[in-house]
Amino acid sequence: MTPEKFQKNLLDWFDLHGRKDLPWQLNITPYRVWLSETMLQQTQVATVIDYFNAFTGKFPDIESLAQAPEDDVLALWSGLGYYARARNLHKTARIIAAQGYFPDSLDELVNMPGIGRSTAGAILSIAFKSSHPILDGNVKRVLTRFRAISGWPGSSQVEKLLWAISTDLTPVDRVADFTQAIMDLGATVCTRSKPVCSVCPLVGACIAKATDTVASFPSSKPAKTLPVKEKVFLLLRDPDHQIWLEKRPPTGIWGGLWSVPEFDSVDEAQQWCGLRQLSIKCQQAFDVKRHTFSHYHLDYTPLLVDTNNPNNFVMEANQGLWYKAEQFNDLGLAAPIKLLLQHFSEDK
């Protein structure tokens, strides 16, 4: 199948069956495209919709985002994961607002925090109607099956080949629709499991389909055993059922978010309380819970400690504050921390 035939088949399908009413497909601006592409990295469309609407409701343009405190940005991102995306979004918004224009070239965009080549290509093709290829997860899946490309798509060699194919197939005309169409095809037809090949506009030239190997593509990432880290999360509660929270460092896991103090052991947590001369009413350790990151498992033990003298503690501490349950939704909190707080902010 020639690139021209590929483009025609895909665009004809998109005209009839493509999604055209997702929030970021309406009132298209470079800012809205950039925001949606950032949110959609490693996150499903169904999850992103509510976050996108809430985010654009609070920050309708790049200027409002640039002027916002980081805490407000992270609060709206809470639960979406991969929080470096939000921090980079905020940094880039400030850079763009300061320079007074949204970059419209590939070189400028990829030099911005958090904007890679594929996100830049989506911004340029959808918002600026400039012919640039993309290579997100959906497109990788379509192309590896269409050409039966073996090897993990995240490897440099395979990725380089896929970029070349994507570049060759990307048209000059209707490039915005083409970009939406190929992402849509991967999201709704050429899906990870149970692809609907019977309605695919490329099925006649798909090598994986012709060789009955669709399930073999794309190749899986080489398996590796994830290490396990163990932590104790201290839920320090005052007589008014407020919980002590501390702001995490700006980089690293959950960077910039609010969280509970964490320790390597229950003994270490108890020593921390003792050094601050906390009057302990009662304490209880709960069952170990697990949260899995991309590169390790976190096994954490919630340790609930009730104190009678929070005021003495506050005078000594300088990195945190007491928060009530009704304030949690206004803070940038990682999903497992938010669940813990909701559970332990009142007696169960």
Image: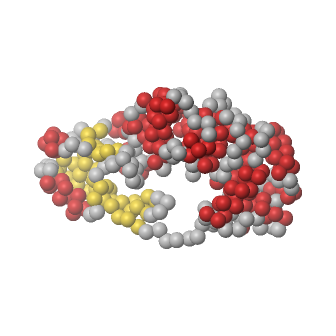
- Residue 92 vs 293, above or below: the answer is above
Q: Quadrant of the N terminus?
A: bottom right
- Residue 47 vs 102, above or below: the answer is below
Classify residue 309 by image quadrant: top left
Q: Is residue 108 visible?
A: yes
Where does residue 163 sit, x and y in percent of width and height?
69, 55
User: At x 40% / y 37%, what residue is drawn?
Assistant: 70
Q: Residue 239 vs residue 325: left or right?
A: left
Q: Nearer the viewer, residue 174 or 18?
A: 174
Classify residue 270 by image quadrant: bottom left
Q: Residue 282 vs residue 224: left or right?
A: left
Where does residue 244 sit, x and y in percent of width and height?
26, 44
User: At x 61% / y 34%, what residue is drawn?
Assistant: 30
Count numbered badges in the picture: 0
- Residue 229 vs 184, above or below: the answer is below
Q: Nearer the viewer, residue 278 or 64?
A: 64
Q: Nearer the viewer, residue 325 or 211?
A: 211
User: At x 45% / y 39%, what residue is drawn?
Assistant: 91
